[in-house]
Image (cartoon, rainbow, N blue to C red):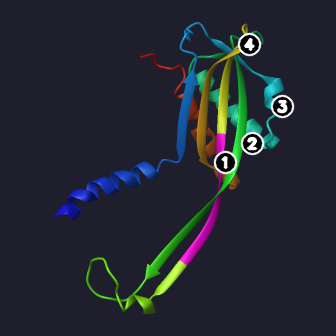
Amino acid sequence: MKTFKLVPVFLLLILASCSTVSVYSDYDKNVDFAPYKTYAFFKPGIDKVEISDLDKRRILHAIDEEMQAKGFTKSDNPDLLVNIFTKSREQVNVNQFSAGWGYGWGWGWNPYMMYGGNQTTVSTSTEGTLFIDLIDAKKKEMIWQGEGVGTLTKNVDKKDAKVKEIVSKVLAQYPPVKK
């Protein structure tokens, strides 16, 4: 009977682990975000980002789409400067699976397991982090920072969708809701 009570908990954990992007944000609590209506990209900062020009354009295009969807206008005299920063790290995943012969359920030593098979698989993936900084253009102070973390893909057909997903989830947290 106890196993049936645990099934919903396991299903919840499985569903929660399916999320492909984690997002976080931080902001200056003393800033009123309402007056900000225009933006431009902070070229000196973006030029320093060490990713391919193709990926950089993907990110900037996705930010453009999200900012315009939020009602912002691109301007030569902006209220906000948008900067990005990226980092990545390799992750190694090790999975071990034991397949044995035996009977019944439960824990303990099974003499039949020693004739079963053990299989270990090792895979690697790249986890990428995108930081989006919003800077007050007049004061030259960062007022908001969003961070999105997700597994990167090398599949060209999926890159655009992945970048859009990360950017939209990060910028969904802007402007912050004051509590």
CB atoms of marks 3 and 2 within 8 Å: no
- Coordinates of residue 107 in the picture (x, y in percent): 30, 77
Number of marks in the image? 4
- Coordinates of residue 72 in the picture (x, y in percent): 62, 16
Q: Earlier in the sequence, mark 1 or mark 3?
A: 3
**Nearer the camera: disc 4 or disc 2:** 4
**Residue marked by disc 3:** 47
Q: Give the Cα distance between marks 4 and 1.
A: 32 Å
Disc 2 residue type (three-letter): Asp
Residue depicted at x 41% and y 48%: 16
| SS for callout 3 | helix
**Nearer the camera: disc 4 or disc 1:** 4
Residue 171 horizontal side relative to residue 102, left or right:
right
Q: Quadrant of residue 5?
A: bottom left
Q: Which mark is residue 61?
A: none
Disc 4 residue type (three-letter): Lys
**Nearer the camera: disc 3 or disc 4:** 4
Q: Give the Cα distance between marks 1 and 3.
A: 21 Å
- Label 2: how many residues lie within 10 Å, few (<14), some (14-19) or many (20+)? few
Residue depicted at x 71% and y 42%: 87
**Residue marked by disc 2:** 55
Residue 105 horizontal side relative to residue 112, left or right:
left
- Coordinates of residue 128 in the picture (x, y in percent): 66, 46
Q: Give the Cα distance between marks 4 and 2.
A: 26 Å
Q: Is residue 149 above or below residue 71?
A: below
Residue depicted at x 39% and y 51%: 15
- Label 3: how many residues lie within 10 Å, few (<14), some (14-19) or many (20+)? few
Disc 1 residue type (three-letter): Lys
Q: Residue 140 carries which label?
A: 4
Highlighted magenta segment, given as a residue range: 120-129
